[in-house]
C-alpha cells in the first residue's frame, strides 16, 4: 500500500485565500495587518525563512517590516527595536527569528515582545495560556500540523500520538495541542531508551528532531499518519537536497497518510503565522 500525500502547498493556498479576504476587510477599515520580523546574523536557513515570511505577507495583502542586524549587534539595540515595535499601534505581530547569536539571552528577548503581539506564541504568558487550554497565539508549526490533521479529519480522540522531539518551538506545544484534542501523547527525545518501541505504537507520528531520515519505515505502524516537521539539507556528496526526519520513500509504503518534505508542514507554518498576525489585527479592530 502506498500512503496518500498530504500536500501542504495545496492546503496553504486554500487557507491563505481566506486569510487574504480577512486582510482585505481589515484594510477597508484602515487596519492593514502588519508583521515585523527581526533577523540577527547570517544563518542561511534563517535568511530563507525570513524572506519567505515577508514575501507571504505581501501576497496575502498584509504589511511587513524587516529589521536585519549583524551577528555582533549588542542585545540592547535589538531590545530597543522591540520596545519601539511594541509601542507602534500599526504593528500587529512581532517575530524574532531564532536561533539568536550566543551573546543573546533568547528567553529575555522573547519576554520583551508584547504578549498581545507575540504571533510566534513563544512568550511565557502565551506558553502558559496554551498549557491552561485558552491559547492567545498557537505556535505556528504545531498550529499548522493541527490544521493538516483537521483538514484530513484524522481522528484524534483516544489516538496514540507520538512526538519525536521536545523543543519549545514544536515538540512541547505540539504535545499540549494533541492532549487538548484528547489524544494519548508520548514525547520522545534524545534520551529515549527504545525509540522504535514508541514510534511503532503511534497512530499519529510527529517527527521534529532535525536529523535527516532518522525515522525508518520499520519504525512506523502500518496505516499510521506520519507528519514530518524536519527540514534537513543532505551533504553535497549525498545530493544536497532537502529531506525530512522521516525516510519518505520507505515510510510511504507503510503509512496511510504522510507529509512530504519540502511541500508539507513548511508552507503551513508560514500560513499560520499569517493567520496569527491577522487574528491579532482583528482583535485590535474589535477593541481587544
Ligand atoms: N526558528 C525556527 N522556527 C522558528 C519559528 O517558528 N519562529 C521563530 N521566530 N524562529 C524559528
Image: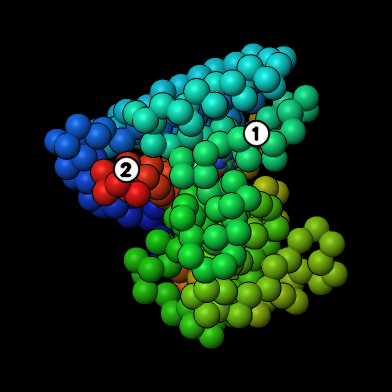
Query: How far across and how far down the image is residue 192, in percent?
Result: 81, 66
The quarter of the displayed image where residue 175 is located: bottom right
- Location of mark 2 (residue): 284
- Position of 27 with respect to 118 (left or right) is left
Residue found at x 60% / y 59%: 128
- Front residue of 232 and 114: 114
Residue found at x 34% / y 28%: 90
Ligand 1 shown in quarter: top right
- Position of 280 with respect to 177 (left or right) is left
Residue 238 seen in this snapshot: no
- Front residue of 13 and 245: 13
Question: How busy is the neighbourhood of tag 1: few (under 14 within 10 Å), some, or many (20 plus)?
Answer: some
Relative to 98, say whether 186 is above or below: below
Residue found at x 62% / y 38%: 110
- Location of mark 1 (residue): 109
Query: How far across and how far down the image is residue 111, in percent?
Result: 63, 40
Question: How busy is the neighbourhood of tag 2: few (under 14 within 10 Å), some, or many (20 plus)?
Answer: some
**Residues at circles 2 and 1 in contact by the CB criterion of under 8 Å:** no
Residue found at x 81% / y 72%: 194
- Position of 249 with respect to 137 (left or right) is right
Amino acid at each position: 500500500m502506498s500512503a496518500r500525500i498530504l500536500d501542504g502547498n495545496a492546503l496553504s493556498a486554500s487557507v491563505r485565500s481566506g486569510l487574504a479576504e480577512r486582510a482585505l476587510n481589515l484594510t477597508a477599515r484602515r487596519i492593514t495587518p502588519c508583521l515585523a520580523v527581526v533577523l540577527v546574523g547570517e544563518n542561511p536557513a534563517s535568511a530563507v525563512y525570513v524572506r519567505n515570511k515577508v514575501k507571504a505577507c505581501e501576497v496575502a495583502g498584509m504589511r511587513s517590516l524587516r529589521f536585519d542586524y549583524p551577528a555582533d549587534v549588542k542585545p540592547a539595540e535589538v531590545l530597543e527595536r522591540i520596545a519601539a515595535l511594541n509601542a507602534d499601534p500599526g504593528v500587529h505581530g512581532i517575530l524574532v527569528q531564532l536561533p539568536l547569536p550566543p551573546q543573546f539571552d533568547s528567553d529575555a528577548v522573547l519576554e520583551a515582545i508584547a504578549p498581545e503581539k507575540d504571533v510566534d506564541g513563544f512568550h511565557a504568558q502565551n506558553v502558559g495560556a496554551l498549557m491552561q487550554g485558552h491559547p492567545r497565539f498557537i505556535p505556528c508549526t504545531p498550529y499548522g500540523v493541527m490544521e493538516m490533521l483537521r483538514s484530513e479529519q484524522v481522528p484524534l480522540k483516544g489516538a496514540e500520538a507520538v512526538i519525536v522531539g521536545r523543543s519549545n518551538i514544536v515538540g512541547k506545544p505540539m504535545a499540549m495541542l494533541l492532549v487538548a484534542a484528547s489524544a494519548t501523547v508520548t514525547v520522545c527525545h534524545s534520551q529515549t531508551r527504545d525509540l522504535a518501541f514508541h514510534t511503532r505504537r503511534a497512530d499519529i507520528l510527529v517527527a521534529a528532531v532535525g536529523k535527516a531520515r532518522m525515522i525508518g519505515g520499520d519504525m512506523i505502524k502500518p496505516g499510521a499518519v506520519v507528519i514530518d516537521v524536519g527540514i534537513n539539507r543532505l551533504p553535497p556528496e549525498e545530493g544536497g537536497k532537502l529531506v525530512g526526519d522521516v525516510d519518505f520513500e520507505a515510510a510511504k509504503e507503510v503509512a496511510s497518510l504522510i507529509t512530504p518534505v519540502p511541500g508539507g508542514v513548511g508552507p503551513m507554518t508560514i500560513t499560520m503565522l499569517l493567520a496569527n498576525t491577522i487574528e491579532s489585527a482583528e482583535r485590535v479592530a474589535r477593541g481587544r
